[in-house]
Image: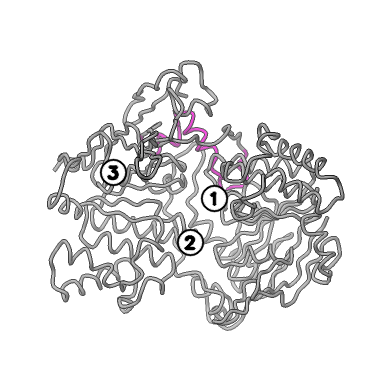
Amino acid sequence: MSLEVRDLKTWFFTEDGIVKAVDGVSFNLKKGETLGLVGESGSGKSTVALSILRLVPSPGRIISGQILFDGIDLLKLDSSEMRRIRGGKIAIIFQDPTSFLNPTIPVGEQIAEAIRLHRKIPKVEAFYEAIQIMEKVGINDASIRARDYPHQLSGGMRQRVMIAMAISCNPSLLIADEPTTNLDVTVEAQILELLKNLKVEKKLSLLLITHNLGIVAEMCDKVAVMYAGKVVEYGDVYTIFESPSHPYTYALLESYPSIRYGVYLPKELKVIPGDIPDGIHLPPGCRFHPRCPFSKEICRLEAPKKIKIGNEHYVSCHFPIS
Amino acid sequence: MSQKILKVENLKKYFPIKKGIILSKTIGYVHAVDNVSLKVNRMETVGIVGESGSGKTTLALCILRLLEPTGGKIFFENRDITDLKGRELRKLRTEMQIIFQDPFSSLNPRMTVGRIIGEPLLIHKKMSKDEVRSIVEDLMIKVGLPPRHMNRYPHEFSGGQRQRIAIARAIAIKPKLLIADEPTSQLDVSIQAQILKLLKDLKEEFGLTILFITHNLGIVYNFCDKIYVMYLGKIMESGKTGEIFISPANPYTAALLSAIPIPDPKIKRRRIILKGETPSPINPPSGCRFHPRCFRAKEICKREEPPRINLGGDHVVYCHFPL
């Protein structure tokens, strides 16, 4: 498996104007790697995920770019070819399992249905397989739970069902869009552990979308930091956390209320002034310049180009921090 | 003036579960808050930490007398306020204020920002409109909003700005105690830092005492002086923030702390992964409520409620087998 996204643009044509949700995003993801897409709301990270699966809702459209999956451009496939890839080779789990699962069908049957979409096997066999997958994702008494409806399960269990459905067709790429945001910390820890184990066992590549920097540090090999529709910095997880180069990455880390393990050293949180721009009224030049402490005249006039500043470390900034 | 501003003793809040519409019967109770005691000193920032269903918000609403407690006592500045009514209760409202989690539903969409912020002044201080106007202007500047936006409506503001409006309204009548119920959980990281900074600055300026309710341990670590950890309506452990984070004594606290993802890729640690999820507060587990998920639980934990153990200083734990 390899995934390469090149200069992807996904815009939404709303009544109020064009929202440039994703505006020239490039990154790649290698086999067995975990890439974290990090950003605040409105940065376009979820739209990237939907674009890869070609599930962008109207009035959104993919304007240009390439999404190369194992060398094939997904944007060029016809809809039946795309359906085979979606759920087959690329699967996704969403933030909110409640709105993803059908409330009127037992969860086991829903997983079986997903299996039968991609493989021609009898219903009974698919249901039996669904139970086995449910056991694999840590659902106790899976044969009984399989007959439960989504409302009979807790939030953590529903998230496990969604993961079971996602891995049911042995995908090579799993996209996880804020998979633990609605869960309590202790349940979040369970789900992250499960994802880690599945990744190793099934040799999955993982595209993890999150705003939680702690999860990124723990789970990811590479990180792409997004701001207002652009990737502002890309690098391996150690580089991003230890020597961030973009002022936004730096400020985001400084404003994050983190804890230190085994010591008590509370820090004064640094504040990034101003608000996140909306997708219609984007600042000219560098989109972060109105909030950036280092911005100069040129930042207002010219959009910064992507520059390579280290081994697989890229930043889009006129005045990167060294 | 005494140090203590708030004391809660054995507070209980049970919500009845009713069945039937006409001849409805109570068939059980949700034990939302069960025998909770806590103390808050003046000028302190105290964190109440817990996962969903721990009863932290119910506790806050009882303290504010927005919910009637089922049992127990609440003292504010050494005065029993558990049964205050009428004018006395209204006066109490000027001493305590709250900021809610959701800035989208906590502001009246049909009132201008100026009216929202000024309303407590009109109600409690009986000021003239002009006086209110100039105070509202000052307040807006203090919380970082341009006063010229006074005549706008809440929908014209972003989430972070709305939370600033809610804060301005809460501090308008200069309360002594401010309860913040997950004030930043719906905000982005960069906006969250702004709101926390604002609360800290206002605390210094107005001499506020803050009761901070949250599930975010990172915020507690950097923001609170003291912590109470709640689980299923009970306090599990309390103490100074440093004590709790360095040497958690209750297995639940330890598991909770080990579950937080830390933004440092070099840290490799053993996680305590708890089994299962928080059970329902309708029929909470017997004995220690945490025993079905606890990795140290023994026979006694099923039968008997854990004792209160003082570990020195402010550090208190409720557990049969503390760490």
Element type at mark 1: loop
Compared across the picture, whether B189 is left or right of B134 comes to: right
In this picture, which residue range is highlighted in magenta?
Answer: B239-268
Q: Are marks 3 and 1 in contact (CB under 8 Å)?
A: no
The residue positioned 63% from the left and 46% from the top of the image is A159
Spatial separation of the CA atoms under disc 1 and disc 2:
20 Å
Q: Residues within 10 Å of mark 1 (few under 14, many from 20)?
A: some
Q: Which residue is mark 3?
A: B62
Which image quarter holds the C terminus of chain A?
A: bottom right
Q: Residue furthest front?
A: B22
The chain holding disc 3 is: B
Tally of numbered tags: 3
The residue identified by callout 2 is B190
- Look at the image and tell me in which quarter the N terminus of chain A lies: bottom right
Q: Earlier in the sequence, mark 2 or mark 3?
A: 3
CA–CA distance in space, label 3 to label 1: 26 Å
Instruction: Assess whether residue B260 is covered by the magenta stretch.
Output: yes
- Whether labels 2 and 3 belong to a single chain: the reply is yes
Q: Do the residues indicated by labels 1 and 2 lie within the same chain of the protein?
A: no
Label 2 vs label 3: CA separation?
A: 32 Å
Residue in the picture at 64% in, 52% down: A101
Q: Amino acid at mark 1?
A: Asn
Question: Residue A8 lies in what quarter of the image?
Answer: bottom right
The residue at which mark 1 appears reads as A182
Mark 2 lies on a secondary structure that is: helix
Is B13 on the left-hand or right-hand side of A3? left
Secondary element at image label 3:
helix
Can you see residue A111?
Answer: yes
